[in-house]
Amino acid sequence: MIEVNTKAYGKIDIDERQIITFPSGIPGFESLKKFALLDAAQQPFYWLQSLDVQEIAFVMISPLLFKPNYNVQLSEQELEELNLSEFPNEEALLFAIVTIPENQAKMTANLQGPVIINKHTKTGRQFIHSDVQWKTKHYILDELASVRNEAC
């Protein structure tokens, strides 16, 4: 176990298996390479907490929860960077970074910049999606409501 200072929970102990390396950092935070993937107090969210700067943490969610048709096509080079033979697959986790404004009902997910993590190698990368249908702001609650309406 490792003690980590977090933005959301203060000092906590984490398992070393929760540490994810982003060799290229995250766009805008390229110098930060080590993060911890934490379950958030509120499911279905996760925290991606920087291990270098306590104040830097990202709220994340699986985009498939509110956008079941969401897909990411990775190039051979991108697959290689994550040491994946194909995507999606069982070794990969897919997330979208969430922005939570003061009015939480207007929280959005960035589907243009998905975060993919190889569970086996514990490496991750944020990609820029080339498909123009995926924007930086998808309203999560609106999307969830539309998925529920389609299911009825």
Image: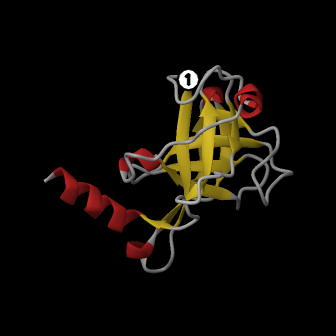
Q: Which residue is mark 1?
A: 91
Relative to 93, does residue 30 appear above or below in the rendering?
below
- Residue at figure coordinates x 52%, y 59% from the top left: 133
Query: Is disc 1 surrounded by few (<14), some (14 to 19) or many (20+) residues within 10 Å?
Result: some
Residue 99 at x, y = what percent?
54, 66
Residue 141: x and y, percent? 35, 65
Scheme of colours in the image: secondary structure
Which of the two residues, 109 or 86, is positioned nearer the viewer here? Answer: 86
Total numbered labels placed on residues in the image? 1
Q: Secondary structure at mark 1?
A: loop
Q: Horizontal and vertical percent for residue 58?
A: 61, 56
Residue occupying image coordinates x 79% and y 60% = 28
Taking the spot 62% from the left edge, 45% from the top edge, the residue there is 115
* Residue name at image x 61 percent, y 39 percent: 116
**Left or right position of 151 against 101:** left
The outermost residue toward the right is 31
Q: Is residue 129 above or below residue 34?
A: below
Q: Is residue 21 above or below residue 45?
A: above
Q: Quadrant of the N terminus?
A: top right
Q: Quadrant of residue 24?
A: top right
For badge 1, the amino acid type reads: Glu
User: Quadrant of the image for the C terminus?
Assistant: bottom left
Residue 65 vertical position relative to residue 92 in the rendered view, above or below: below
Q: In this rendering, would 76 be left or right of 152?
A: right
Q: Nearer the viewer, residue 58 or 143?
A: 143
**Residue furthest left in the image:** 152
Residue 38 screen position, x and y as percent: 54, 43
